[in-house]
Image: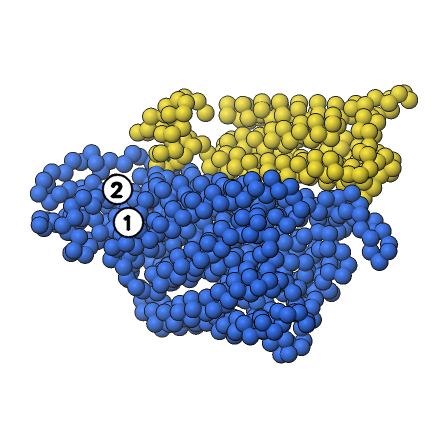
Amino acid sequence: MSEQKIDGFELKPGFKGMASDTGSDQTMFKGVHWGKAMMWIFLLSDTFVFSCFLISYMKGRGSTIVDWPNTSEVFSLHVGGVPVPLLLIAIMTFVLITSSGTMALAVKYGYEKNRKMCGWLILATAVGGLTFVGMQVFEWSKLIHEGVRPWGNPFGASQFGSFFFMITGFHGFHVSIGVIFLFIYTYKVFAGHYESKKRGWFTKMKGDYVEIEILGLYWHFVDLVWVFIFAFFYLW
Amino acid sequence: MSDEYDNNKSYQAQSSEVMDGSTGSVNPDIDYVRPAEVGEQDLYHGHSFIEKWVFCQDAKVIGVQYFLTAVFTGIVGLILSWLMRLQLGFPELAGFMTAEHYYQFVTMHGMIMVVYFLTALFLGGFGNYLIPLMVGARDMVFPYVNMLSFWMFFVAVAVLMASFFVPGGPTGAGWTLYPPQTILEGTPGSGTGILLMLISLSLFVIGFTMGGLNYMITILQARTRGMTLMRMPLTVWGIFTATVLAMLAFPALLVSAIMMTLDKVLQTSFFMPTILKAGEVLEYGGGSPILFQHLFWFFGHPEVYIVALPAFGIVSDLISVHARKNIFGYRMMVWAIVGIGGLSFFVWAHHMYVSGMNPWFGFFFATTTLIIAVPTAMKVYNWILTLWRGNIRINTVMLWCLGFIVTFVNGGITGIFLGNVSVDVPLSDTYFVIAHFHMVMGIAPLMVIMGAVYHWFPLVAGKMLHEGLGKWHFWITFLGAYSIYFPMHYLGFIGVPRRYFEMYDSPYMTSAVGMNEFISIAAFIVGAAQFILVFNIIKTLKTGKKAEQNPWKANSLEWYTSTVPPEHGNFGERLPVVHRWPYDFSVPGAKDDFIPQTTAPSEVIHTEVEKT
């Protein structure tokens, strides 16, 4: 979005620029697409949702009477009979972060109007997300198999299962919604909806490759949240 | 402008470059407004009845839908309050009512009025209708999402109302829904009732988020040419700041609702400590009920300002228009709104002074709470100073505004009592608290809503509401509301606790009984008086006098649409261009006593000012 020109308005750098943009008419964020501004503000609100969850988790974990389960044992995978802590979660994190990379490339190719590359990269992102959700399903079923339930578990404080299933579930729900949209946009890009200015199914509005960037913002956010969940659940 | 001020040449309205008649020179550059940054909005016009009136994407229709749905829930809340007052004043007539019913009515009344009535009415109703018109946009920026927002709210209301009809009835845990009792057996509606309440709240938050994104982006990114943030009417500022608060505060409500739902359905123990019930240890254990209180009030206190800030904004505009004077200290008013909004996130624990928290913690929150009084008092002074030496028109709208100032100051002062820990502790959970918050966030915003209805009805419906009926409506409501809440302060001082179904043989029974009867009678009358407005609206729609365009001679853009009522797209072929703030009333030297925002500096018609 650099090097843009706005008729009759001088874009200044730094704090002065911010002040003059704020004081100007029409728009506060010069040249920023409505949808993109909306996504940023939605993500700010969503940040508060996840912050509330994580702060509650810290409070909950800090005030239980029973000891918290030893996470490096609970979350370990047995490879050839040897428990390897953090193995699954390392793979999951790697897959999700990689999908952020492919998403960023998709945005780049989208703005270059490279329809094919953009489509393939969104598809790769969607597959990455799907793999992540799949591994999460595996992890959940493994824990459930070992007796971890939202209302209790054999390893320690019952809040462990409660917070774990709630927060990773809420994050997984975000990933799943993202995957659904990634598949929809894969179709839209391959079908050339942005070139033909086809109107949306529901909104009846014409689209643009900026939508890929907006989707990308959401996807990077979901990844960023995962980093926090990873740190708070698996490393603490 | 009134003649007596002609001699006062030092009055010069901000941003209005009115030429003195004698100089006569007109510089064409002063009319320059830079070109549009964004192209015309792509609008989808509905074709069928369903697309035009049901699943409509026009923000004005959505605003009216929000308004009517919110008023419906408000009437339900009103009827619940009648039933409560019947029990408190005349228990012998309320034989059909059990203690369980009473608690359910208290709970539903509180939740309905705060969330589903006031919040939805101000942000969903007035926000949707006024934001695009006042900032000069064709519609909200995401009309489809806006439509979904209303229907999500509608479903939330439907789920809430459904809880009246499920076995066990709605929840009776008090509107704060404190665990652990909320979801334990023995509390009315602890089965399906509380579940529906939590689901309904979650849906409300999701629906509101969709709407809130629309309000914020429309204000930030879709203003018309020449409309800077500091030229926006204060109504827009109030709604905008309230929306920001809501976007940051509702997450806490959503999270606490999700966690409590899990506590209820899956027997998790987020909020549930170890509980002994009839000698038996329940399955819960290890949770923190205080955590819920923190989450709830982190939402709950900003929620107070989500209701109050739009009211502040709207009343500023109404006072300015009907006193024919620019709002005093516009920038101060804006910064006060923003400052109150910011501070409101740091005061939540003043609702928890009796929860057993560390006294130093209470000291911190008492300090922040009292600091909020500073910007709030600035606003009150500015309203008074706007009225001072104004060309005041004592019409219905102005009466409601004056009523607002009085009730708001009253409620604000009792707020200073309750903000101090040492005063709050004995007054906590008494009728003093009831009196305080009903005055400050019940009656005061309601006064603004009524004023706003009388003010903007000509725009929405194209007809003038009947003034005489309006004045009856005002005086009964105003005096009646005082009759209800003023004695409650006294009841609080003598220690009558709130949320009690009856006083049994306590000493209050004798000293408070007459007062309770009086309050109840006043409540019945005030409640009934609200139907004067319903009657007035129906009568006006049928036989009312047709309104001229801009009947109040206001300056803001909503009165300068191509048609009245405005059609989809609001402004006809060309969007208006804004040259000034909306408060150029009684500008010395100008011919009319108002200069619309769209008037270019060189177009101002001026007259010779008599020199004395």
For numbered disc 1, what is the local secondary structure?
A: loop
- Which corner quadrant of the image does residue A18 belong to? top left
Indicate which disc, 2 or 1, sits on the residue closer to the N terminus. Answer: 2
Name the amino acid type tagged 2.
Gln
Q: In this view, does B568 lie to the left or right of B420?
A: left
Question: Which chain is home to disc 2?
Answer: B
Q: The blue chain is which one?
A: B
Label annotation for residue B326: 1
Residue under numbered circle 2: B14
Q: The yellow chain is which one?
A: A
Q: In which quarter of the image is the N terminus of chain B?
A: bottom left
Query: Which residue is rendered at x = 78% and y = 35% of the image?
Result: A137
Name the amino acid type tagged 1.
Asn
Between the C-alphas of marks 2 and 1, the distance is: 9 Å
> Residue A234: percent from the left, percent from the top?
75, 28
Q: In this view, does A81 lie to the left or right of A195?
A: right
Q: Is residue A76 left or right of residue A21?
A: right
Query: Which residue is rendered at x = 71% and y = 32% of the image?
Result: A130
Question: Cβ–Cβ below 8 Å for labels 2 and 1?
Answer: yes
Query: Which residue is rendered at x = 60% and y = 39% of the image?
Result: B360
Q: In this view, does A82 lie to the left or right of A3?
A: right
Q: Can residue B49 be seen in this view?
A: no
- Which corner quadrant of the image does residue B227 belong to? top left
Alpha-carbon neighbours of circle 2 within 10 Å: few (<14), some, or many (≥20)? few
For numbered disc 2, what is the local secondary structure?
A: loop
Towards the viewer: B139 or B447: B447
